[in-house]
Amino acid sequence: MPDGEFCTRCGAHRSEGRDRLRHFALRPGEHIATPGVLSTLLPRLAHGRVHLFRWALIAGVAAVAILAATGLVVPAIWVAALVVPALYLTYLREAEVFGREPLLVLLATVVAGGLLGLALTAAANQLGDNLGGGGVIALTVGVAVLAELLKPVVPLLALRRRFPHTLEGLVLGVAAGTGYALAQTLLNLLGTSGGAPLRVDPSSWVFTLFSAALLIPLLHGSCTGLVTASLWRPRGGREAGLRAAGLPLALVADIGFTVGSELLDDAGLSPLFVLLWQAVVVSAVLIAIRLVVHAATLDEAAELGVREVVCPHCGRRVEAAGFCPHCGVSIAASVAKEPALSR
């Protein structure tokens, strides 16, 4: 193997074991159990561009909060529904994840997820009008199960052969999930606010809109991304056990998020406790994704031969397989959007 601080086949630092659990394969500076939203769900984004997306996400959520605080609920709903999907579509374009086929990707993922969200949410709203408390919980569980079974169908059946790497499966799953969340948010919240005047009392909307802008799209995107990433590779490997757990974990997370939020709200607790519960569930799903992607990235890197490349992170020209021997970043997971500086 080439000289360097990191093994170019598994990415481990010379001072640590082969599984490198202290260093996430896509971001060596982060622990694998850190629920980083951007480093997990935007895996091919160049390091120098991460701060732009972080500030864009903060600005979108802040815009929702300002609109809600001033009583402009309907505009706030639209902005909340569009923040994460728009950011993710920008990421797909920025990182050029699918090369010259963006139209195929958009039609097959975001639109398919949105149509599924429209169908399931409309059906659930119609059925829920005639149900009591226990029936609503049962309906919520049924919708969550159907959603997690159906959201990954288009990426898994139509796109897996064209885009064979696990990271591509993750990105397609997240895109489908954000499309689903967009449709769900618009149907649920616009229906709730139907007929409302231009300005309303914001006290009952701020927490709801914060959840709709950030936590709900992150939940659906992460759950679908977990399922697609865990099922993307047809053969085994070190992630074989994690692959089997992907769909059950997504089902538990979706049900726990929705049912737990309803139970906490019915108990009369502060909406802040509901948001904290939702954040805990989303964080758990993000960590599960990182475990799956970490193991899959190591397996896929081990299959690559050593060749001369320019590391898109540190800019060095190196002899490498899956990981840069100098900075430990996954070569396959990175896209050089910054100038490569020779050293």
Image (cartoon, helix red, strand yellow):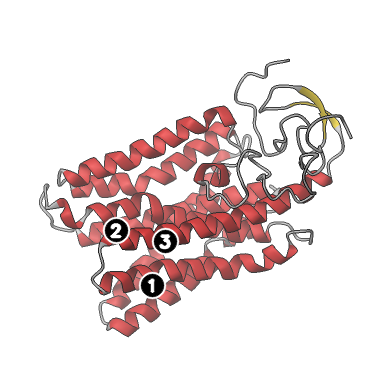
Alpha carbon distance from label 2 to label 3: 26 Å
Q: Where is residue 71 in the image (x, y as percent from the top left)?
A: 15, 47
Q: Residue 274 at what x, y percent from top left?
A: 33, 63
Residue with the mark numbered 2: 272
Please name the residue shown 56% across and 42% down the image. 39
Quadrant position of the N terminus in the picture = top right
Q: Which comes before the other along the chain, label 1 or label 3?
A: 3
**Which element is circle 3 on?**
helix
CA–CA distance in space, label 1 to label 3: 18 Å
Q: Residues within 10 Å of mark 3 (few under 14, many from 20)?
A: many
At horizontal 49% and vertical 72% (from top left) the residue drawn is 145
Residue 58 appears left or right of 325:
left
Q: In which quarter of the image is residue 340?
A: top right
The residue wearing badge 3 is: 117
Q: Which of 243 and 118 is in front in this view?
A: 243
Q: Which mark is residue 259?
A: 1
Q: Name which of mark 1 and mark 2 comes first in the sequence.
A: 1
Mark sitting earlier along the chain (2/3) = 3
Q: What residue type is labelled 3?
A: Gly
Q: Which amino acid does label 1 sit on?
A: Val
Amino acid type at mark 2: Leu
Gap between marks 1 and 2 measured at Cα: 16 Å
Q: Which residue lies furthest to the front in this view?
A: 15
The image quadrant of residue 136 is: bottom left
Q: Against 143, is 192 above or below?
A: above
The answer to whether residue 268 of the structure is visible from this angle is yes
